[in-house]
Amino acid sequence: MLIKENRSILIPVDFSKQSLISIQQTYNLAKYTKSKLILMHTHPDNDYKKDLHDLAAKTSQESGLHVMALNVCGDLYNQTDIKAKEMDCSLIVVGLDTQIRFRSFFGGSNVSKFLKNAPCPVMTMRSVDNRNACKNIIMPIDLSPETREKVPIVVQMAHYYGADIKIISVFNPNDEKYENELLPYLNQIKKYIKDKGLNCTNKSIPSAHVPETIIEYANKNNGDLIIQMNKRDLSIGEMFGKALSLRIVESSNIPVLTINPMIRQSISSSIH
């Protein structure tokens, strides 16, 4: 799976500082993927139509990109997935509230559903730091069937930005069998990435606190982007709590690219 080129990047806008920063941080990626930007605002009465068109014009002038304004009525959570699918968008970019939990765009009960139903990868940003550049991509890896599906996008993004890839795997300290199975798998993925001409390192960390450990590692290693997969099947604990991918999105101060699983064909001949 790759981020498709010559398509559109959909950016929900609520005119908050965070959503405006998320637009600016999309410029380079839009240029790399030859994409146009679609700035979408939802409001029950469509009161912000002129403001949105003015913002689109300003964004186009500032970035040199083709920018489209889309003002629609309805719930932002529903409309984002619907419009992304209708317009065959390659990516959704969402600027989140800078607090520890979602507030400005989505209610907590809707976030997981939004990510799961998204028809394309979703990049979430909550930091106000300018991350147009990307020097280090953090890639969490586990032994789930879908984890390898993100490797092509990680390689694609690393080539775009000239970034290094840092693989991180967190496992239960008491699960020696899991650790033994994980090591050769990590080395296989690392070799695949290096064969693509990219710098890559891997680190395994025993910890019972997976999302916190991944985010801490990303910050200690100057991570600019975390790329992760959603799971097809949730554990019993995740069904009644929160999936790992959602917990990382909710807590990370570093942009997170979340990908929904697809049929694993793209690299099956190289990584088993």
Image (tube, rainbow, N blue to C red):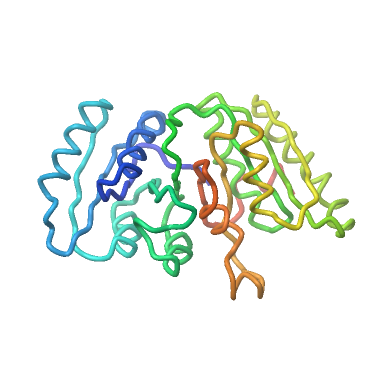
190 left or right, relative to 51: right
Q: Where 116 falls versus 96 (above or below)?
A: below
209 left or right, relative to 110: right
Residue occupying the point 17% across, 64% down: 44
Residue occupying the point 14% across, 42% down: 53
Query: Residue 229 in the image: x percent, y percent?
Result: 58, 53
58 left or right, relative to 99: left
Residue occupying the point 52% across, 34% down: 157
Query: Residue 87 in the image: x percent, y percent?
Result: 29, 52
User: 94 or 33: nearer the eye?
Assistant: 94
Q: Where 267 falls versus 207 (above or below)?
A: above
Query: Residue 248 in the image: x percent, y percent?
Result: 57, 53
Query: Residue 237 in the image: x percent, y percent?
Result: 66, 72
Quadrant of residue 267 in the image?
A: top right
User: 30 or 252: nearer the eye?
Assistant: 252
**Outermost residue to the front:** 99
Residue occupying the point 27% across, 65% down: 75
